Amino acid sequence: MKELPFAITLEVGSSHANRTGSWRVERPVYVDRMPPCNNACPAGENIQRWLYEAESGDYETAWRQLADDNPFPAVMGRICYHPCETTCNRAQLNEAVGINSIERFLGDLAIERGWPLPRAGSDTGKRVLVVGGGPSGLSAAYHLRRLGHEVRLVDSAPELGGMMRYGIPAYRLPREVLVAEVERIIALGIHVELDHTVHDIESERRNGGFDAVFLAVGAQLARRVEIPAGDSSRILDAVSLLHRTAEHDPPLLGRRVAIYGGGDTAVDAARTARRLGATDAVIVYRRNRERMPAHGDQIEEAIEEGVTMRWLSTVSRFEGDHLVLEKMRLNDKGFPEPTGEFDELDADSLVLALGQDTDLSLLDEEPGITIEEGVIEVSPAMMAGGNGIFAGGDAVPSERTATVAIGHGKRAARGIGAYLAGQILVDPPCNELATFDHLNTWYYSDAPRTRRPELEQARRQSTFDEIFGGLTEDNALFEARRCLSCGNCFECDNCFGVCPDNAVIKLGGSARYEFDYDFCKGCGICAQECPCGAIDMVPERI
Amino acid sequence: MTSQPVRFYQVGSFAVGNRLFDKENRTVQSDPHRSNSLDSGHRACQGCGEALGARYALDAAMRATGGQLIAVNATGCLEVFSTPYPETSWRVAWLHSLFANAPAVATGVAAALKVKGMQDVRVVGQAGDGGTVDIGFGCLSGMFERNDDVLFICYDNEAYMNTGVQRSGATPPAARTATTEAVGAEPGNVFGQGKDLPRLAMAHGIDYVATATVADLHDLEAKVERAMQFHGARYLHILVPCPLGWGSAPNDTIRVARLAAESGIFPVFEAEHGEVTAVSPIRHREPVESYLSLQSRYAHLFGEHGRPDIVARIQAIADHNISTYGLLEEQAVGTGSNETSP
């Protein structure tokens, strides 16, 4: 201790000699957690990060971040079933962040301003064959090009897009949007061959000298059931209904249309039937609404458009101008059982939407590939066999949505990249999930969600115009700022401000903060008052 | 459709900083070059509300005065933990004399500055609740009455914490302290009138009186800023939870302060010339129990032998505050000022 006379001026900064950090029994540490939206995204988007960029109005950076994982922002912003919003922590405060609307806003802006995708990587000399030009194949092609591999993309249809073109109706996805995003991918230098059906994968691979193959052949064979029917009864399947409608050659359905099935395809078929002029579009489903596999918002929109539902019913037979339905009931396990009671439903045609199967005949000569229940078994790296055959999309076991397929394409591209480099794809360790209880929500402004404008009812029932409009820039910015940034620092300065010991150093820019452990007493206020749960208290080893 | 400018900033203005704000609208505390008037190395307990409150207030005063500031400190925790001989944590011109006379010393400093023609240098007097409502009250009342050009700040932690948690005139009813044990039919401190110093200050008719807590930094800084626009006697009363004396967890300091305001037990308002001019509306109203149950000084009110009757009396005090100050009124309008103005 310095010898000083009493009652005198003490030196400024002299308390720095007292290292109060030695009092500490717990230390705060900055952590990054996995936001629920990112965790839920089948396409593996870093949603929170692109929202962060969008919050400051830097839409181009936000879009680039988004497109880094998914080359279809404008398409996804329309047709994705957004599991991110289902898990969004903001929903527990008021309503989930409208991630899907912002994605669409960014996607549309990118098309409007002509922002290009990242360039292809430098040439590796490796050649990859992608079979199938749907969401999975296109996504794989995009990521493979960025890794520098040469890509040949073949499809049996006359146009690219797969189910995005031939399955999803135009009122949900206008074709010019699809074309814009597909063309942007192809512009990376992908060799495309259309109207080309692969019958034998091994000879195709050998003839082209490909080092690896990605199979994304989809599931296009409509499942049928035997329904006793009279000669004049008209039965068709939903896949061909949607396909022909997409090609501007819709089949004749009559005025009263019954749709048999409970998935999203059944709903799409019913809504398409309404637009083709059906006065009655009735979905017949053997279970009830709670157990219907179609997504809730799709069902609601269909009901708004005048589609009706016959729950707990199966089709027994089709007699000329009416269907005979058998009533069902759910047993204890929730399975439908016949009751022996019958009902009638007037119908001019019956559309079967009972699921789809995959045509895997191209693999008939291929050894070492396991096919279970009509789909290809794959490793976590999407590899189907040991010799460089990978598969994804509807052809492998999974939920069959475009977003899942896009995720498969990305994953397979990485798996193929690792395979071609003689390595095995290893996933980085996953951060702990940022659940709602990690948040200090007091700090967030209350803010209701911005809704996208909807097309008026009358137009919705008779045209294939797109139903939802986009957000305006003001709305998109507002919506992005509703993000809570769960589990990851967004530089709100709370820790820096609330420390009674000035033991937090603000690094500035986007470098966040550091603790000054010389003076941090370990009180834990910073961790408690962090809005997003990005600080943990860990015991000191004493 | 009318278009409105986008004024929503994710954390609004509730958090300390906000990368989306303009520089001018940011808090003093979010500035990496803030003055840190009370610097690291001080010996306040873990999670000290007073250390936090003092830095918030003086840093704001330093910005408001361009660094031309002298602080006069009464005896108390703040003085003891900041200046253990031969160290000081102050980065502001700072003066300590006695427990009772801080307001009088501040008056003298202001008078000396006037004589020397240095009226651009401003004076802050500061003390804990003991030095303000009890021991220093005579000097303070005189300072008010003479309208001396001093901003006096009370950091209220509701007892004499430095000497071992003895009750003060600011200790709330039913709180246990070393001198108000939690025994008998009326455990803890008595249900008296209390000494409501912001009201007493208003009764002097001085230019500016305000209350604040360490839980609302934007409000606290705005009040210091406003106070510095007046020349004459001004009073700021800041609620600063004390983990030691209140028996709250060190990491709960801000949470407890927030609950004091959100329950209505500590009304946050400002007054000019003896009239209340603004109140901070309650955002999410909480029962007093949420506030009390975090503090072991109220532990005797809960549990198996709890005293719901006493909790109800405390709730009645909060309800009275809410109706007297109109703390819920602005909620009807909806979002409150925090939502729209940065």
Image: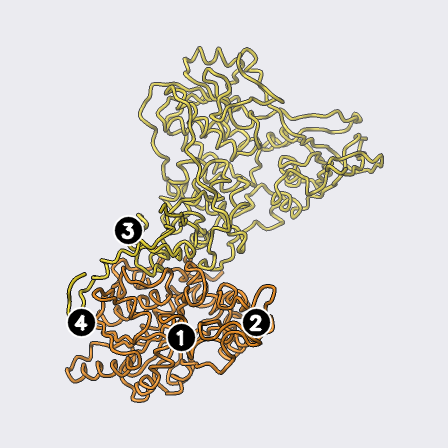
Chain colours: A yellow, B orange
Instruction: Name the N-terminal-most of marks 3 and 4.
Output: 4
Residue occupied by mark 2? B311
Spot occupied by residue B213 in the image (x, y as percentages of width and height): 40, 69
State the separation of the CA atoms marked 2 and 1: 24 Å
- Can residue B6 be seen in this snapshot? no
1 and 3 marks on the same chain: no
Foreground mark, 2 or 1, reads 2
Q: Closer to the camera, A222 or A165?
A: A222
State the separation of the CA atoms marked 1 and 4: 36 Å
Residue occupied by mark 4? A6
Q: Classify A217 as above or below B155.
A: above
Residue occupied by mark 3? A507
Residue occupied by mark 1? B211
Which chain contains the residue that carries disc 1? Answer: B
Instruction: Name the N-terminal-most of marks 2 and 1.
Output: 1
State the separation of the CA atoms marked 3 and 4: 39 Å
State the separation of the CA atoms marked 3 and 2: 46 Å
State the separation of the CA atoms marked 4 and 2: 49 Å
Dot 4 amino acid type:
Phe
- Say whether residue B184 is left or right of residue B211: right
- Can residue B198 be seen in this snapshot? yes
Are discs 3 and 4 less than 8 Å apart at CB?
no
User: For the residue labelled by badge 2, is the local secondary structure a helix, a strand or a loop?
Assistant: helix
1 and 4 marks on the same chain: no
